[in-house]
Image (cartoon, rainbow, N blue to C red):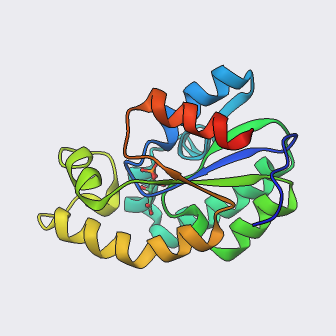
Amino acid sequence: KGEIIKSGNIVLSGFMGSGKTTVGRRLAAALDMQFVDMDLYIEKKTGMTVKEIFAEYGEPHFRALETETVKELAQSNHFVIATGGGTLMQPQNVEGFHQGGGTIYYLDVPLAALQERLKNDKRRPLLQTPDRRAVIERLLNERRPKYLASADVVVDAGAPTVVVVERICALRG
Ligand code: S3P
């Protein structure tokens, strides 16, 4: 979908546990670009963890902070940006990144791998429930069509970090 604009931001999309942060850090280092993780950016800005923001102000407030963050980051150039798993569920955020010349790479990881990677997570508010595996399945089924639709590039990402980084570099040409 559209041409890949090399001068713009690289925006990493994908479900929780898909490797956006890990891959993003390595990719930025490999391409000599700046790296920013949206969750960490929001945590720094608010002085609260994402978990605390959800608990104290609720999810809608966190979503508003994400949209504010997209507006700020979309202006930048030559950044690798790791989004949160829910960021690109809001069409205005997809639009924001695209308007800023960003290219969205969706890190596509199979359900079973995500369930395995997330099984001991203590940090993500949406997963602190006893039926975690089922929640992951339901959320992924609901979100995957949107990840695919908003992506400029789909990356097969159920592989070790170095391999995924190489794949993105190759896809970038
Ligand atoms: C969320 C994903 C998290 C974080 C928040 C909500 C989501 O980011 O933004 O817990 O809705 O999928 P990661 O994808 O980095 O875990």
Q: Where 26 sits versus 127, above or below? A: above
Q: Position of residue 58 (x, y in %)?
A: 44, 68
Q: Quadrant of the C terminus?
A: top right
Q: Where 119 sits versus 89, above or below? A: above
Q: Residue at x 56, y 69 (%)?
A: 148
Q: Position of residue 117 (x, y in %)?
A: 26, 45
Q: Residue at x 23, y 58 (%)?
A: 128
Q: Quadrant of ligand 1?
A: bottom left
Q: Is residue 88 visible?
A: yes
Q: Position of residue 119 (x, y in %)?
A: 18, 49
Q: Residue at x 44, y 42 (%)?
A: 19
Image side of residue 170 versus residue 5, left or right = left
Query: Closest to the observer: 60 or 12?
Result: 12
Q: Residue at x 58, y 62 (%)?
A: 87
Q: Within the image, what quadrant is residue 36 found in?
A: top right
Q: Position of residue 4 (x, y in %)?
A: 80, 51
Query: Closest to the observer: 127 or 45?
Result: 127
Q: Is residue 89 visible?
A: no
